Image (tube, grey):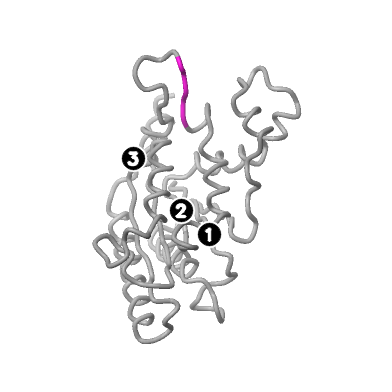
């Protein structure tokens, strides 16, 4: 069974197709999940709304707890990491991660950055050994076969690669970098632009964004899910 982790990070409640002043990124993620589950009804969906219920930012106590070996942690350390453990457990279960990440002042929302800080964690999603030869850091999810779909929205236009202000777009690149660090490198993207113009260009961009989502659903649905296959093989052999 495929597991899909659906994450929304917009501060706007509701999608722009269902609510006045709704979120375009929520519109795209809900469309992806709706299309995917229609074509793959056996899919298990985990939903996480970090836009309306943001993870707590990490603190000095969190860092202290995370870098203390699990067997040596005190009770307060386990409690400090409890919310992070929940988020990581969701991520570990997922074959496909569909993340709605709108652009806020050229980067991801603070809520999504807090999510990233909670899931990029030593000993759980990346390894670290200062005595290791060469690179002391390594990804722990590199062989998990996970796929990431980043669905974004922007008030201006021209943020796509090669666009007029692509150099100001730090959304997809920062999300890609963080997920690649833990081993998720199969990444796909779509976005809506022109939100602040609210004219025919926005309407056209919405159509293009929705078409891109439909293409991604078809493309990823035709591609074997390595993580699912690996778990099936483990069940058969062990």
Q: Earlier in the sequence, mark 2 or mark 1?
A: 1
| The image quarter in which residue 139 lies | top left
Q: Nearer the viewer's eye, disc 1 or disc 3?
A: 1
Q: Which residue is nearer to you in this view: 63 or 142?
A: 63
In the image, the segment drawn in magenta is: 126-130
Q: Earlier in the sequence, mark 2 or mark 3?
A: 2
Q: Residue at x 48, y 56 (%)?
A: 108
Where disc 1 sits, the SS reads strand
> Mark 3 = which residue?
226
> Mark 2 = which residue?
43
Q: Which residue is nearer to you in this view: 220 or 166?
A: 166
Position of residue 223 in the picture relative to residue 68 (left or right): left
| The image quarter in which residue 71 lies | top right
Residue located farthest toward the right when viewing the structure as drawn: 75
Where disc 3 sits, the SS reads helix
147 versus 207 height, above or below: above
- Mark 2 neighbour density, 10 Å: few (under 14) some (14–19) many (20 or more): some
> Mark 1 = which residue?
8
| The image quarter in which residue 73 lies | top right
- C-alpha distance separating marks 2 and 3: 15 Å
Q: Earlier in the sequence, mark 1 or mark 3?
A: 1
Residue located farthest toward the left when viewing the structure as drawn: 162
157 versus 59 height, above or below: below
18 versus 190 height, above or below: below
Pointer 2 and pointer 3: residues touching (CB < 8 Å)? no
Magenta residues: mostly which secondary structure? strand
Residue 175 drawn at (x, y percent): 42, 49
């Amino acid at each position: 069974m495929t597991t899909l982790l659906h994450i929304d990070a917009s501060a706007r409640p509701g999608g722009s197709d269902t609510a006045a002043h709704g979120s375009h990124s929520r519109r795209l993620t809900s469309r992806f999940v709706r299309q995917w589950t229609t074509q793959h009804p056996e899919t298990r969906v985990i939903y996480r709304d970090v836009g309306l219920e943001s993870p707590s930012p990490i603190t000095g106590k969190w860092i202290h707890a995370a870098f203390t070996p699990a067997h040596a942690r005190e009770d307060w350390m386990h409690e400090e990491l409890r919310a992070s453990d929940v988020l990581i457990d969701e991520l570990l279960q997922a074959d496909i991660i569909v993340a709605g990440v709108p652009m806020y002042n050229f980067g991801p929302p603070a809520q999504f950055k807090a999510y990233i800080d909670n899931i990029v964690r030593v000993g759980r999603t990346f390894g670290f050994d200062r005595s290791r030869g060469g690179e002391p850091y390594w990804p722990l999810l590199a062989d998990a076969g996970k796929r990431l779909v980043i669905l974004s929205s922007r008030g201006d236009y021209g943020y796509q690669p090669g666009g007029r202000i692509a150099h100001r777009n730090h959304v997809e690149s920062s999300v890609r970098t963080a997920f690649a660090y833990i081993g998720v490198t199969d990444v796909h993207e779509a976005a809506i632009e022109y939100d602040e113009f609210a004219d025919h260009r926005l309407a056209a961009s919405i159509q293009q964004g929705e078409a891109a989502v439909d293409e991604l659903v078809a493309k990823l649905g035709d591609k074997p899910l390595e993580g699912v296959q690996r778990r099936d093989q483990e069940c058969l052999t062990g």
